[in-house]
Image (cartoon, helix red, strand yellow):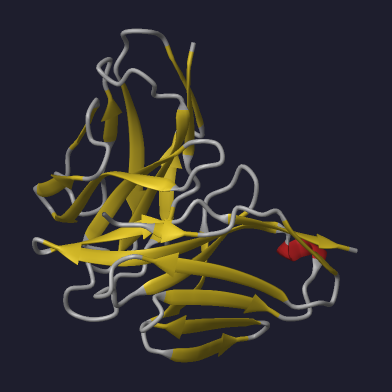
Amino acid sequence: DGGITQSPKYLFRKEGQNVTLSCEQNLNHDAMYWYRQDPGQGLRLIYYSQIVNDFQKGDIAEGYSVSREKKESFPLTVTSAQKNPTAFYLCASSIDNGASGNTDTQYFGPGTRLTVL
Amino acid sequence: QKEVEQNSGPLSVPEGAIASLNCTYSDRVSQSFFWYRQYSGKSPELIMSIYSNGDKEDGRFTAQLNKASQYVSLLIRDSQPSDSATYLCAVVYSGAGSYQLTFGKGTKLSVIP
């Protein structure tokens, strides 16, 4: 059963704590993405990776870090430097970034809801 | 400045009617356009992608693209209460060798039984 999984579904963070959100895909997609969604808002891009061992900052990367050591995995760490981390975090993947044709369709995981206590 | 604009709604239509959702974008060179449906508390799911001017139909859904007017729309025929959700328009913007998807804030649709 192919798809994108995210864990945990709900996460609670204390002030000053770093937390890591997991994202795994078995679709053999090269590109992976992290978005943040706040209530009543669209999705905003945090980081993206077009290939293993490479990633780029999106529009709101401050206070976040990522790694891409394996094609299947793209974990996101929310650091203590992120002052307002409470949000719904969504991971997505696509065949590639669309540079070679219409292969840029992104598919989303179920999301992780992070709350700061 | 990358912008994707949608009316936030809510848009209310009676069951069986046609729902029309609209989206405008700012970058003339955009080539890829997507509509996602998002139920409350859930992640977005892809409904349609469209790359060429004109209409693209898939079941009860029709996407319409007009690149000259920088306008993309989604029509839902025979609307059902299960279509009640927020619909997100997304546009791929390219620059500096990368291709990024920019989302509108979404239009909330309510289909009234």
In the picture as drawn, the residue positioned furthest to the right comes out as B113
In the picture as drawn, the residue positioned furthest to the bottom comes out as B54
Q: Is residue A1 visible?
A: no
* Horizontal arrangement in the rendering, residue B98 relative to residue A116 (left or right): left
Q: Which quarter of the figure has residue A13?
A: top left
Q: Is residue A76 above or below residue B20?
A: above
* Horizontal arrangement in the rendering, residue B39 relative to residue A8 (left or right): right
Q: How many marks?
A: 0
Q: Is residue B48 above or below residue A32?
A: below
Residue drawn where x is 39% and y is 75% of the image? B70
Q: Is residue A107 above or below residue A14?
A: below
Residue A98 picture location, percent across and down: 23, 72
Compare residues A36 and B14 and report the one nearer the observer: B14
Residue drawn where x is 51% and y is 88% of the image? B56
Residue A82 picture location, percent across and down: 30, 21
* Horizontal arrangement in the rendering, residue B58 relative to residue B11 (left or right): left
Residue B71 picture location, percent across and down: 45, 75
Q: Is residue A82 visible?
A: yes
Residue A28 picture location, percent across and down: 27, 64
In the picture as drawn, the residue positioned furthest to the top comes out as A15
Residue drawn where x is 27% and y is 28% of the image? A77
* Horizontal arrangement in the rendering, residue A76 relative to residue B87 (left or right): left
